[in-house]
Image (cartoon, helix red, strand yellow):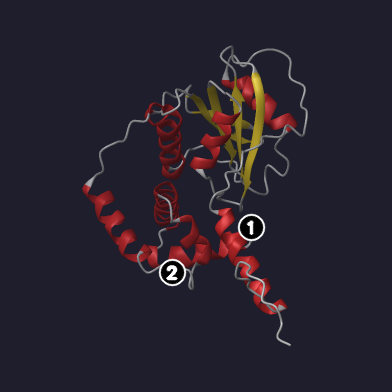
Amino acid sequence: MAYKATITKPQMVFDSENYSELEKELDAIEAQFKVREIEITFNKEALFFGDIKASVDVYSFLKNRILKGIEVQEHFIAIFLSQANKIIGYYHHSTGTINATMVDVELLTAVAVKTLAKAVIISHNHPSGNLTPSEADRSLTRNVVKALKFFDITLLDHIIVTKNGYYSFNERAESSIMGYVPKLSPQEKKLREEILRQLKRVTAANAPNLFEMMQSPQGYEQVEQLVIDKVLHDQMVPAAVIPMLETEFSMI
């Protein structure tokens, strides 16, 4: 006697290995349609009485409550302020080497927007004790000004902190705090052209940290300025500076 056939929808039967692969593919497809909300968590408290009225107030706040190992590694910190210059919170963005730290301008801006900040003060320390800003510091300042401006957020100051003092871009009327880009001299243009040639040789294989950093326009400009500072300060050629920087970043 023949089995009675039941008309049903077609079925697919997978063994455990194939089902596992299918599950991964479905998860990958589903992930493309998910949007995650950024969550900002305030996980520490630092008492501070009064408004931020001057750079000395920021220096006091940073030195006494945040920066540890101020003479060991560079730290990059952002302070987010309300319309009345009340501190909403601070963001310890990165910790780097003895003479550099990586800064993601896009991430920094995203946090400022999420906290509803109307003004931002950025700061980093120089473990060497030298208060003179580098060209990389000025370039970063211009990039932050430009990014925040899209959201009507003001960069009030960029403060370099050392154990014995500070340097305020606002107090010194640095042009970079207003987003001004100075005209390059012929020597600087020639140096940038040589650096560009050398940076084109950077790959994920020979310098993974620098390569990753250079994937955004801001990151590329930051790497370029780090190389320029090394060339001018240590009298080295760009080809020798790039592997040195990669070694420093790999130690972070």
Q: Is residue 119 visible?
A: yes
Q: Which one is nearer the viewer's eye here, 188 or 153?
A: 153
Residue denoted by label 2: 203
Residue 237 position within the rendered picture, expressed as x and y whole percent measured from the top left: 38, 64
Residue at the outermost bottom position: 1
Percent of width and height locating residue 44:
77, 32
- Tell me: residue 188, above or below residue 85: below
Where's residue 71, x and y in %?
67, 45
Res 240 → quadrant: bottom left
Q: Quadrant of residue 178?
A: top left
> Which amino acid is tagged 1?
Ile
Q: Position of residue 113 (x, y in %)?
A: 54, 29
* Residue located at (42% from left, 27% from top): 149
Q: Earlier in the sequence, mark 2 or mark 1?
A: 2
Residue, x 56% and y 30% (percent of image)?
112
Is residue 27 found left or right of 230 in the rendered image?
right
Q: Nearer the viewer, residue 5 or 50?
A: 5
Question: Who's the residue at 63% across and 68% down the image?
Answer: 8
Which residue lies most toward the front here?
A: 1
Callout 2 secondary element: loop
Tag on residue 80? none
Quadrant where the C terminus lies? bottom right
Residue 237 visible in the current orientation: no
Q: Quadrant of the N terminus?
A: bottom right
| Amino acid type of the residue tagged 2 in the rendering | Thr
Question: Do callouts 2 and 1 mark residues in contact (Cβ within 8 Å)?
Answer: no
Is 236 placed above or below 157 here? below
Residue that numbered label 1 is attached to: 252
Which residue is rendered at x = 65% and y = 21% of the image?
87
Mark 2 vs mark 1: give the one in front.
2
Give the side of residue 81 with respect to residue 233, left or right.
Answer: right
